[in-house]
């Protein structure tokens, strides 16, 4: 089909260009990975720690990355059972990794130049279920870097739930996203529906 007619020829050429660009990108990344500088900080020997170590190396290399997404592998927040023990393990995994990453940013003099933010698609319910907590709505988000320390927003009430017995969030999630957009000098109105405003007083730079 790609060789029959003018349109097919143009399509084939576009496929070749896209394939070539993709291969060039892969080779560039492979070359970059071979030349990344080592961090000064010792990172936890976990999958999450390894990914944070790589992120710090990319920052050291000044390779131009603006956004680095790191899934927190090695832990599961889907704690329908045995919530307490799993939550403690998750918090240790998260805390150890972020402590090492923060120390490396400080060693680079970049602790106020890199915004680290946690994101989750759901929270947990208030009521216990066989030692665990089912999927819920309101959750906690954390930021590290050029931010004012402390809690921003009020804790959800344990006495007032919605019609589905979920906690009611006191700070809209799109405002959290708007804060990240502002940090990147992106107009929240251009990327988020409803023109949400960022969280006042959260960013310090």
Image: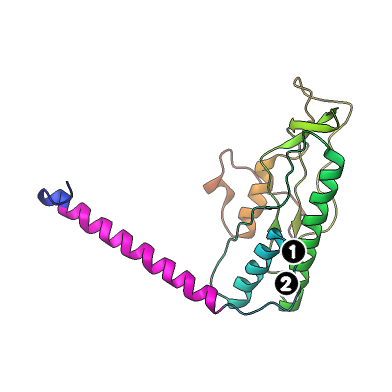
Residue 188 vs residue 44, the one in the foreground: 44
Residue furthest top as drawn: 163
Q: How is the image coloured?
A: rainbow
Hey, which quadrant is residue 15 in on the image? bottom left
- First to last magenta residue range: 9-35
Hey, which quadrant is residue 161 in on the image? top right
Q: Which mark is residue 129?
A: none
Sequence-wise, the earlier of marks 1 and 2 is 2
Number of numbered labels in the structure image = 2
Q: Are marks 1 and 2 in contact (CB under 8 Å)?
A: yes
Lateral position of residue 130 relative to residue 115, left or right: right
CA separation in Å, label 1 and label 2: 9 Å
User: Can you say whether 46 is above or below 82 in the image?
Assistant: below
- Residue 82 in picture, x, y percent from top left: 83, 37
Q: Which mark is residue 105?
A: 2
Of the two numbered discs 1 and 2 in the rendering, the one whose residue sits closer to the viewer: 2
Q: Which mark is residue 145?
A: 1
Lateral position of residue 116 relative to residue 194, left or right: right
């Amino acid at each position: 089909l790609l060789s029959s007619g003018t349109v097919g020829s143009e399509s084939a050429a576009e496929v070749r260009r896209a394939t070539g660009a993709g291969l060039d990108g892969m080779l560039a990344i492979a070359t970059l990975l071979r030349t990344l500088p080592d961090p000064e900080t010792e990172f936890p020997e976990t999958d999450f720690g390894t990914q944070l170590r790589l992120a710090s190396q990319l920052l050291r290399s000044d390779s131009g990355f603006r956004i680095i997404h790191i899934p927190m592998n090695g832990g599961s927040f889907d704690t329908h059972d045995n919530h307490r023990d799993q939550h403690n393990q998750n918090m240790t995994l998260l805390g150890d990794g972020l402590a090492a990453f923060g120390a490396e940013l400080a060693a680079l003099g970049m602790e106020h130049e890199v915004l680290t933010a946690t994101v989750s698609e759901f929270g947990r319910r208030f009521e216990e279920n066989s030692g665990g907590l089912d999927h819920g709505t309101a959750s906690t988000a954390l930021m590290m870097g050029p931010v004012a320390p402390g809690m921003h927003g009020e804790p959800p009430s344990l006495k007032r739930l919605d019609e589905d017995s979920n906690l009611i969030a006191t700070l809209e999630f799109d405002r959290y996203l708007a804060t990240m957009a502002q940090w990147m000098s992106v107009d929240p109105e251009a990327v988020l529906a409803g023109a949400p405003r960022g969280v006042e007083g959260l960013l310090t730079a």
